Amino acid sequence: MAEYEIDLGNLMAFDPHRSFSSPPSSREELVKESLEQGTKLVQAVADTLFVLPSTEDPDGPIVTLPPPTTRLPREKPLPKPKAPTRWELFAKKKGIQKHKKDKVAFDEQTGTWKRRHGYDRVNDDKDVPIIEAKMNDEPGEDPFAKRREEKKKRVDKQEKNRLHNLKQAAKSGALPSHIQLAATALPITGSQAAPKKVGKDELQNVAGMAASATASGGKFDKKLPGEKPTKHEKKYRKFLPAAEGSGMSSLEKQQTEKVLNKLISKNSHEILNVEKAVTMYNVTEEKKRRSQKGKSFSSSSKLKPNKKSFKKMPKKGSSNKGKSK
């Protein structure tokens, strides 16, 4: 058996010593010889697989493939490293290690375990009924309004930092793919491209995509000054009201009949065979015509006078009378 280079990690086999003794005279001969050589290589891979230790399974023996030994070329270029954020730079400078927090935490106000983030989270400001006053609090100041204002400032600061990180990523050419999909002027691959002037139509498309990304299609979003409402090209779906009222039964009946008529018309070729129906109709009409024709013939034959019977009757009577006399 010829020696093959087999890479079970990639399920690949190669014959380095294979060469054509003479160039093939036709394409059929080349295809035939290639298939023969490919069959030998596949058989060599199968033989090597059955040598590996296996475990029994209802579907058959299962083997664990070794790591691949052949380095295959990459289809797409390597992604560029993401630019570090300001916090990552600060944490690296100070030596701060990132620790994974638990998803739940103990809430001291209610004495129960709650989620750290999201709905009904731990230490939620809405669940605080009383806020203790401090020595440096100003008299007459609403502590609840102050906490809401501080939270708004924190959110604004986070949004500012996020935009700053996106700018740094755009400069290094490693912008996230979901941002590139929204910004049509940027390349999808993340590579640095020549600056392109964004037109009015592209900006309107991106703004429309962002506005219609909500469940309501941007109906309840706040409009910017001078922003036009988004165009809805498709038809709006109409639903029946949830509460019952006058005329509701008739509306539901009409809607049900409409759905049934649509289903029947859609599957009419399966429900009714038109050709068969027409043939049966023609046959029944023909039978009716024949029966009517037979009835009319019998009735007309009964109404016609029988001349022979009327002629013979008086002769018989006269002869009888003469004989009797």
Image (spheres, grey):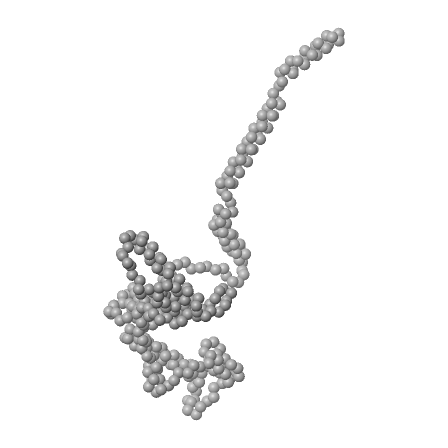
Nearest the eye: 25 or 256: 25
Task: Please state, as top left, top right, bottom left or bottom right, where the N terminus lies in the image.
Answer: bottom left
Report if residue 137 is visible in the image. yes
Nearest the eye: 52 or 176: 52
Nearest the eye: 268 or 313: 268
Nearest the eye: 183 or 83: 83
Classify residue 217 as left or right of residue 17: right
Report if residue 129 is visible in the image. no
Which residue does the image show at 31% across and 75% down from the upper left?
A: 81
Residue found at the far front of this picture: 1
Count the marks: 0
Task: Please state, as top left, top right, bottom left or bottom right, where the C terminus lies in the image.
Answer: top right
Up the image or down, 319 lies above or below 142; here it is above
Which residue does the image show at 49% across and 77% down from the upper left?
A: 120
Classify residue 3 as left or right of residue 244: left
Residue 204 location (% of width, % of height): 32, 65
Which residue does the image show at 70% across and 12% down from the upper left?
A: 317
Residue found at the far right of this picture: 324
Up the image or down, 10 lies above or below 272; here it is below
